[in-house]
Image (spheres, coloured by chain):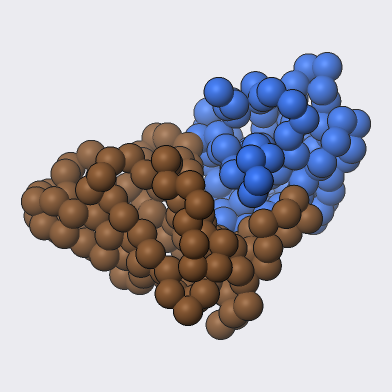
Amino acid sequence: GAGVSQSPSNKVTEKGKDVELRCDPISGHTALYWYRQRLGQGLEFLIYFQGNSAPDKSGLPSDRFSAERTGESVSTLTIQRTQQEDSAVYLCASSPGLGDGNTIYFGEGSWLTVV
Amino acid sequence: GNSVTQMEGPVTLSEEAFLTINCTYTATGYPSLFWYVQYPGEGLQLLLKATKADDKGSNKGFEATYRKETTSFHLEKGSVQVSDSAVYFCALSERDGFQKLVFGTGTRLLVSP
């Protein structure tokens, strides 16, 4: 597509429920990233994919968070047993490759509110 | 660890005023530095970047110079427009085998006619 697409754009969920956030990167981009921004804080790196592989998962806040990517395209970020502190904007981004010369393109984000 | 500090907003200016948004960083090594902008209802967009000391990034009338001696990357524009109203994020890239961006908290700019 023309840009990075994320869905849903807004999600309100009850504490304890699971949520899935979807990201469609720009076609042909091999690198994909997930970031989180909680209110009043900077963006926090969560995880990246090169192809379908996530070499470093240490940025995920807890074992309730997981992410996968299939077909070197769509990625899903899953949060199990959501907590109120998970409320944030979840941003997905993609780039043609991993190197410094590659511009990273961001989606508009998925706003998650846990009540 | 690496970090980015930028001035809190909102910054409120009149059209054609001079803009400065301060950004300082703490990093090991020599990171690349970026300014991203988020216009209302849109995703983050790269505004400009600089990859080494004394480099100047520029775009759309905005400029920022990579100052290693002061660990700063202040964003400037000589004459702002209403359409520049947005949230501006300063960031650095940790070269950890991939571009891991470390962001500041963002500064909202409001420009009135």
Q: Quadrant of the N terminus of chain A?
A: bottom right
- Which of these two is toward me, A6 or A40? A6
Residue A8 in the figure: left or right of residue B26: left
Residue A10, image quadrant: bottom left
Residue B1's image quarter?
top right
Please name the color used to draw chain A: brown
Looking at the colours in the rendered structure, which chain would you say is drawn in blue? B
Q: From the top left corner, tell me how far across and down residue B65 is, in percent.
A: 84, 34
What percent of the width, then of the height, locates residue B6? 60, 28
**Residue sitting at x 10%, y 49%:** A15
Measured from the top left, where is residue B22 in percent x and y?
68, 28
Q: Residue sitting at 68 percent across and 40 percent down?
A: B95
> Which residue lies most toward the right here?
B54
Residue A27 showing in the rendered view: yes
**Could one spot residue B85 in this view of the protein?**
no
Residue B29 position (above or below residue B94): above
Q: Give percent across and percent down for residue B76.
A: 77, 37
Horizontal arrangement in the rendering, residue B18 relative to residue A46 (left or right): right
